[in-house]
Image (tube, rainbow, N blue to C red):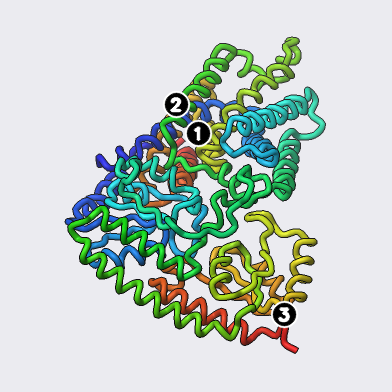
């Protein structure tokens, strides 16, 4: 018995791993999520060997790292993360990988959240009144202006770690920021007619987006993450939606459909899926992802009957 | 190869330690016909942690741990008290009821707390891949103590698990020793579930003893076969997890499933 499974597996383990060890001269980057991976790729360029831990379409807060993730972190040159308490699994993963570069201050870990004005920062840090996130809402990149700040943070980090290549990185960064500026201008223009539109979302992922483009989030389907909404909560939500004329409901790929569908159906508004992690739906870049999100939002508002007389 | 050990030595060691205590406790659990008792106790522990959370203690803090331990001990009292000499209700039913009610209670408690149940769910899923050195030491200490305790009173523990009727007749305090059994069992399960998750702990507990039962009736033979089988399946599961990049816990559970399948076939074909 022991022999049957054990040795072939171990051999396989051996064989599969050998080629991976010889990636030459590349900058090995582990990014916690697709959005960060995409930005890092654009800043560092062709020499970036990027591994993304949270597969697109998964809940970023709760990822179960696999052995490959641990190995990638162990051998990585740079670790890029969203900071705050976005990745609940970040510390255990770094701990298991034991890569000393990521433990020291000013080490090779880059926190993309530096200098971002956070929303929903709890007033009382005891958590009793609070919210799931002690530092504030960590889904900050749903506002593209914050995405620019992320890019700057990444760029600063990469330049600090590879000063000899700073010219190249800075050039790439400038290009990326230009792209973002152009996109922000376009999005603002496209969304301008819909200023003040109200919507409902499943998880608190979209306050930054709403604030930037002047949307009004009426409420959330999950009163607390993981707790099924109570009847009273749904009733209150339905009343709020009517009162404030919510025009659509937003969920994300990994959230269950049933509750969201019911809320949308009862209010007779469309339900749309928005993406916050580049890589979902085969869309690899941040700008392309937001383009698609905004297209879906506009389509939903146009289709929605709620609030039209 | 070095990568495999550098990366996986902690999960490997953890799996060996877990096999050590659970394959032994599994013997008792099977004898007592209470296979799901660990799930039930784990859920009670989670309820305790949820209550601590509601009062405002962080998960993994000392008060949270103590409260979940206290809850587990309450569960132990219930299980010891409901094991009567002349069984009217099957104990399995009591275990099921406790499981359902404590799960539901935990959800209700958490609906009043500022945060959701993700953290509690996290507590029940564990991740053996990310086990830390401190956790390994902690496991050694707790399981070592429990193991010593059981070794010291092994005669009594084996007697009340296998032949409670006789021990009742012999005038031994079965209730008391049942309580001791469930207390120590609860202590082990609370810690191991947090590290390895309910699925994996259940497999460590049940599969080695069941596989051993296929091949032997003797007590010590069953224990030794259980340990060997448990370690073999753990190593195979961890190797497969590494080779194919599967999540480590579920990969070990499936290795246990395969082990059971092959052992059954072997038994059927050759013995």
Where is mark 1, residue-wise? B208
Whether residue B199 is situated above or below residue A46 in the rendered picture: above
Considering every residue shown, the one lying at the far right of the view is B88
- Who comes first in sequence, dot 2 or dot 1? 2
State which chain disc 1 sits on.
B
Q: Residues within 10 Å of mark 1 (few under 14, many from 20)?
A: many
Q: Of discs 3 and 1, which sits in the foreground?
A: 3
Where is mark 2, residue-wise? B137
Q: Residue drawn at (71%, 31%), measured in percent from left and top?
A: B75
Q: Residue drawn at (62%, 87%), measured in percent from left and top?
A: A302
Whether residue A7 is situated above or below residue A77 in the rendered picture: above
Q: Is residue A170 left or right of residue A212?
A: left
Where is mark 3, residue-wise? A268
Asked whether residue B119 appears in the rendered view, the answer is yes
- Point out residue B264 in the picture as x, y percentages from the top left corner: 49, 41
Q: Residue drawn at (72%, 87%), measured in percent from left and top?
A: A308
């Amino acid at each position: 018995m022991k022999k049957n499974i054990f040795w072939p597996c171990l051999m396989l383990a051996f064989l599969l791993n050998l080629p991976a060890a010889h990636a030459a001269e590349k900058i090995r980057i582990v990014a916690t999520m697709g959005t960060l991976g995409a930005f890092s790729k654009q800043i560092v360029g062709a020499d970036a060997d990027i591994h993304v831990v949270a597969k697109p379409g998964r809940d970023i807060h709760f990822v179960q790292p696999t052995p490959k993730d641990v190995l990638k972190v162990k051998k990585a040159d740079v670790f890029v993360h969203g900071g705050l308490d976005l990745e609940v699994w970040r510390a255990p993963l770094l701990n298991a990988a034991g890569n000393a570069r990521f433990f020291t201050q000013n080490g090779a870990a880059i926190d993309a959240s530096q200098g971002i004005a956070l929303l929903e920062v709890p007033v009382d840090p005891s958590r009793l009144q609070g919210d799931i996130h002690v530092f504030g809402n960590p889904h900050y990149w749903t506002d593209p202006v914050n995405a620019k700040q992320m890019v700057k943070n990444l760029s600063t980090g990469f330049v600090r770690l590879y000063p000899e290549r700073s010219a190249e990185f800075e050039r790439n960064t400038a290009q990326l920021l230009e792209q973002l500026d152009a996109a922000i201008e376009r999005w603002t223009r496209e969304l301008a007619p819909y200023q003040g539109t109200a919507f409902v979302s499943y998880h608190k992922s979209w306050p930054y987006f709403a604030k930037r483009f002047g949307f009004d989030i009426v409420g959330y389907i999950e009163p607390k993450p993981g707790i099924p909404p109570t009847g009273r909560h749904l009733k209150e939500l339905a009343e709020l939606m009517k009162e404030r004329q919510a025009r659509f409901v937003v969920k994300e790929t990994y959230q269950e459909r049933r509750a969201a569908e019911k809320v949308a159906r009862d209010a007779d508004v469309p339900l749309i899926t928005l993406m916050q992690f580049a890589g979902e739906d085969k869309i690899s870049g941040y700008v392309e992802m937001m383009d698609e999100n905004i297209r879906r939002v506009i389509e939903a508002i146009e289709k929605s009957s709620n609030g039209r007389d | 190869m070095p990568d495999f050990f550098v990366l996986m030595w902690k999960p490997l060691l953890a799996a060996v330690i877990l096999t050590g205590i659970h394959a032994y406790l599994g013997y008792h659990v099977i004898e007592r016909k209470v296979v799901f008792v660990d799930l039930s106790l784990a859920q009670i522990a989670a309820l305790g942690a949820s209550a601590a959370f509601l009062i405002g203690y962080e998960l993994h803090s000392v008060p949270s741990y103590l409260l979940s331990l206290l809850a587990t001990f309450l569960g132990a009292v219930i299980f010891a008290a409901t094991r009567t000499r002349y069984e009217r209700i099957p104990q399995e039913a009591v275990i099921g009821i406790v499981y359902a009610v404590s799960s539901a209670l935990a959800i209700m408690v958490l609906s009043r707390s500022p945060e959701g149940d993700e953290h509690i769910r996290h507590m029940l899923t564990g991740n053996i891949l990310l086990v830390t050195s401190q956790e390994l030491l902690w496991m050694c200490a707790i399981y070592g103590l429990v193991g010593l305790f059981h070794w010291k009173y092994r005669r009594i523990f084996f007697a009340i698990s296998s032949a409670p009727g006789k021990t009742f007749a012999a005038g031994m305090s079965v209730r008391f020793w049942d309580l001791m059994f469930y207390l120590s069992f609860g202590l082990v399960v609370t810690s191991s579930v947090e590290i390895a998750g309910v699925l994996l702990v259940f497999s460590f507990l049940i599969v080695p003893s069941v596989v051993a039962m296929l091949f032997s009736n003797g007590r010590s033979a069953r224990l030794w076969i259980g340990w060997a089988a448990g370690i073999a399946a753990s190593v195979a599961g961890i190797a497969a997890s590494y080779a194919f990049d599967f999540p480590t816990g579920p990969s070990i559970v499936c290795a246990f499933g395969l082990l059971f399948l092959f052992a059954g076939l072997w038994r059927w074909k050759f013995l």
